[in-house]
Image: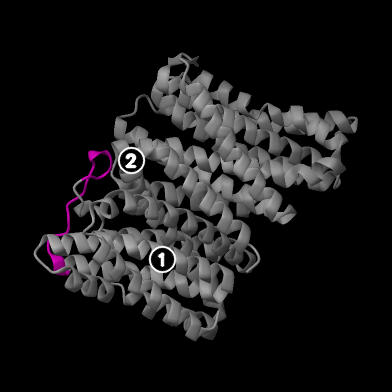
Amino acid sequence: MEAGTLLLWSVVAALATGLGAALGVHPWIATRGIGWSSAAAAGLMLGAGYVLLTAGEAMAPTATLVGAALGLVLMRAADGVPRSDHESHPAMPGGRVSTPPATNVGAVLASALHSAAEGVAIGAAGAVGVAVAEFLLLTFALHNVSEGAVLGARLTGSGRRASSAAGIAVIARCSQPLFAIASLLLARAMPPLLPWLIGASFGALLYLIIAELLPQSYQQAGRTGIAVVVSLAAGMVALMGVAP
Amino acid sequence: MFGLPAVWAVFLCALITALATGLGAIPFAFIKSLSPRAAAHANAIAAGLMLGASLGLLSEGVRHGPAPTFLGAAAGVGFILITQRLLGDHEIAFASLTGADARRMLLIVIVMTVHSFAEGIAVGVSFGGGASLAIAITVALAIHNIPEGLAISAVMRPRGVSILACALWSVFSSLPQPLMAVPAFLLVDRVRAALPYGLGFAAGAMVYMVLIELLPEAYDAAERRSIAVLAGLTTVAMLLFQQAL
């Protein structure tokens, strides 16, 4: 995918965060809406992750898989920082909730750090092919809507206006397009790094799916429907993206 | 091969791969009891193994045809969905378990057994490609089956099923391999066309099992981040393992 196109669409995906923050004040959006959009995002992400993995393994299998482990561990390390994820929501899975973010500033910073890793995945996908990049951009646009809804609910809950919350949410996700374009340019300039970037992206996506999207979806919309949506979305992306 | 008629060589090789599945129960001989949190972590590990195996199956299927693999995967999801609905209305006893535990165990063994059909076909088809290919596939599948036995035992053992029963159910889940390998070998050309459907079916069924049973249960008893690290790293380890083969 061309660098300019990738930058444009990743900015659009980041702007979707503002839409989520604005819509997050609606009770249905803040609960079941987040659940279903997270499930769709999880399926798309799993499918796109599979396509990335296949591409990386074709280039350098060991580097890709070691990179995947590193990406997963790094995402876990970043998740240790308090952030505005679903843990700030009143209803979360299994009663095993972690400590909510201490401050709004901390939540916004952590969200920015988190979306930087997602930006690397978009950039790596852009270096692999147009189809997988398009699916990943669509995935992150959906994911950003639910992230924005969660962050927006937190900010409006602490007294901010919806428009202000939407602006802050978009700013927090700006690291996504920035890291997307940077990782695409890096992969183009240093091709041997591409399998590592692809692997790290796959690991990061896997962590996001299992640590965030699935628990959020199960809690808001039940098991069976979510499992069907995730499986079929992943299968469709894998089917359409295998020939990038 | 081995001085045996080809059909018996196919059967023997596929039987070896099936018996290897029972080795997956061995680690549980050293684990006496599991807390709910440890059981959740075991489920996360099983989920990672199954997810890694599914990605491997999908890769293999896609090489033979993306669309048939996807159709097979959709059928696998539908199969488990329907099986689950049917089992949901009946009280089940399975491997000394009853109720929800029995239903879950039975589903897992069914999925693994269905999965084995495709592997049996793979063993049979590989004999059509010559002895060295057949040996490579047999060794690969035998080693690949050990974590599958581990995945089955990781779910059964925390519910009080004995080591021997874990091993036997693990082997049982792979019995379709020798049973399917011989007809696959005999009908290799026709089966070659059906292979992506079978591989996709097994992958779809396994992914759906991970999503409908293993991960939700793991989230119920352990913190989501530890579940993600365990399941994610196990997925990657399984992929590395398959790559090394």
Give how far apart the Cα atoms at labels 2 and 1 are. Answer: 24 Å
Q: Is residue B176 part of the magenta span, yes or no?
A: no
In the foreground, A98 or B7: A98
Q: Nearer the viewer, residue A242 or B41?
A: A242
Residue on which disc 1 sits: A140
**Chain for disc number 1:** A
- Secondary structure under badge 2? helix
- Compared across the picture, whether B218 is left or right of A3 comes to left
Disc 1 residue type? Phe
Residue type for callout 2: Tyr
Q: Residue at x 51, y 47 (%)?
A: A231
Q: Please provide the residue range marked out in magenta.
A: A91-105
The x and y percentages for residue B241 are: 57, 50
Disc 1 is placed on an element classified as helix
| Quadrant in which residue B62 is drawn | bottom right
Mark 1 closeness class: few <14, some 14–19, many ≥20 residues within 10 Å: many
Q: In the rendered image, which residue does mark 2 sit on?
A: B219
Q: What's the residue at 26%, 61% (across, down)?
A: A149
Q: Describe residue B35's horizontal placement relative to residue B127 as left or right.
A: left
Classed neighbour count for the residue bearing mark 2: other residues with Cα under 10 Å, few (<14), some (14–19), many (≥20):
many
Q: Which residue is at the front of the view, B124 or A94?
A: A94
Which part of the image, by quadrant, shows the N terminus of chain A?
bottom right
Residue B11: x percent and y percent?
79, 29
**For the point 37% across and 80% down, which residue is it?**
A178
Does the magenta-highlighted stretch encompass residue A100? yes
- Whether residue A27 can be seen here: yes
Q: Residue at x 44, y 16 (%)?
A: B97
